Every structure is written in structure tokens, then in C-alpha cells.
Image (cartoon, rainbow, N blue to C red):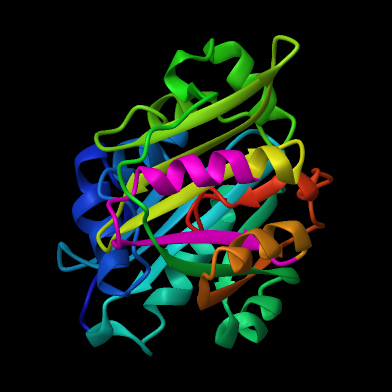
Amino acid sequence: MNDQFRIRRMNKEEVDPIAVRWAAGEGWNPGLYDATCFFAADPEGFLVGEIDGAPAAVISAVAYDGKFGFMGFYIVKPEFRGKGYGMQIFRAAMDRMGERNIGGDGVMERIKDYETQGFKAYYKNRRYQGAGLGGRPVKDLILVQDVPFERLAAFDDGIFPARRHQFLKCWISRPGTKGYAVTQYGKVAGYGVVRPCFKGYKIGPLFADNVFIAEKIFNALRQDVPKDQEFFFDTPEINPQAVQLAEKNKMKVVFETARIYTRSAPLIPLNKVFGVTSFELG
């Protein structure tokens, strides 16, 4: 082939029009303002493959620290599929991750392909769809922006596999985003965020010490979704109380992924993960 395929890092202004909007076109429904926060997680973690200077493929390889990373946004434009470009940019992302344990959310029909590249599936994540309640007052909860950030970050550190403070600062402060927290004895015991997406709204993350706190935050977030507008909630199937929370609220499964890792599943308290932050960054 005469095409020149060149892989390079994306800059901040390219993440939204290439990675995020391509993902929206694939039906993955990212948030309207996700790009800035994703870039904040790792400014060198977004790769684009170009043919004769035009974007043809994209992938993210976000290195949270020296031990853990997460890959996502693996998309090749339809007219360039089946020509080996996808594998080239995938390998470039893997090379960037080095010896880190790499996580990802793979669509179910591609799991065998990921296994050939060293990944192993550990459990399913389910995307549930429901309807907002809209406008009811929220009581006995703290706005997440009013929680001292070091306390919020400390709670997040105990659940997510790596520190992600720059990402978290951005994630809770984007336009249209609402979040609530519960504190006990001066410490955060749970928090959750809802954000506007290309289609409806999405809750994520929802982390809590127990299901009672999780349900209280979930109900508050659902109030912030306009009445009868759709919202989505990604839950780890391995946490039965998270699944029960969604189904108790008459939500329906519309999509599933497999959570995959190259080394092993991180030793995190999955019983506290009620809502996944995002399928793109973990």
C-alpha cells in the first residue's frame, strides 16, 4: 500500500473531536465534557494514527502511575478497517504501557481477540438504562464540590486501583455535572457523580462503603436527571448489591463489557464499587 500510516500523540484540542466524538459515533455515549478530564489523567496517553495526515485510528493508553494503566477508545475508521492499522496502533499503546498492569473494558464479541494480546477477562460490567425523576429536593447530602478535596481523594484512593487526583478534580467540576457525598466521623463514606452525555445522562462513579449509602446517593443523582429523560448506570456484575440497586429501580440492561487485565485484577474493594467511572478510563 502507498498510504503512510503515522502514529503520534494527540494534543488537548484533539481529544474531543477525534477520540470522544468518534466514540459517540460508535454508540458508546461518552460525556459531553469528558475530553478535558481524560486528557488531565495523562496528557501523553492519547494516540492517533494518520494516513497522509488525516486521522484513521485512535486509542488511549492512560498511565495512572508506574504500575497501573488503562486502555480505551480503540477505534479505526470503517474505511480503514481490516488493513492492519488497528493492530499497529494497539501495539503502540501496549508498548507505551510497558510493564504496567493494563485494564480495559472489552466488548463481549472481541474478548477472544484481547486474550490473544495477553488480556484476561475477570468479570462483566453491565450498562443499565432508566428514567430520571427530576427536580425533587435533595436532603442530608453534601455537594461533592463542598467536600475538602483531600478527603474525597483519600476515599477514591482506597477504591480505584491508582491515584487519579488531577482527573478527579476535573471530573467533579465540569459543566452540567452534579455530585453528592456522605461523610461519617469526618471521613467520606461515599460519593457519586452524574453528567450529561451525548445521549441522556450517566452516573459514574458511585463508590460507597455500603449499599445504604450507595442508594441514598443514587436516589439524589437520579433527582438531578430531568424527569423521564434517560440515564445510564454502569455496574460491576461481580457486586450483586450494585446489580440489585439498578434492578430495584426498574433499570434495564442495554450493553455489557468484560473487564480485562493483562496481569491480574487489582486488589480493590469491588463491594464498594456500585457505579463504574467510565468504560474508557476505568
Q: Is residue 258 left or right of residue 80?
A: right
Q: Which of 93 and 146 is in front in this view?
A: 146
Residue 52, horizontal then vertical, whole percent: 15, 68
Q: Range of the magenta residues?
A: 215-237
Residue 199, horizontal then vertical, whole percent: 27, 63
Q: Is residue 74 above or below residue 140?
A: below
Q: In this view, does 272 lie to the left or right of 15?
A: right
Residue 225 among those drawn in magenta:
yes
Q: Quadrant of residue 245?
A: bottom right
**Image quadrant occupied by the N terminus:** bottom left
Q: Nearer the viewer, residue 193 or 66?
A: 193
Residue 234, horizontal then vertical, whole percent: 55, 60
Quick check: can you spot residue 100?
Answer: no
Q: Which residue is drawn at 33% across and 74% down?
A: 27
Quick check: can you spot residue 19?
Answer: yes
Q: In this view, does 221 lie above or below 128?
A: above
Residue 207 among those drawn in magenta:
no
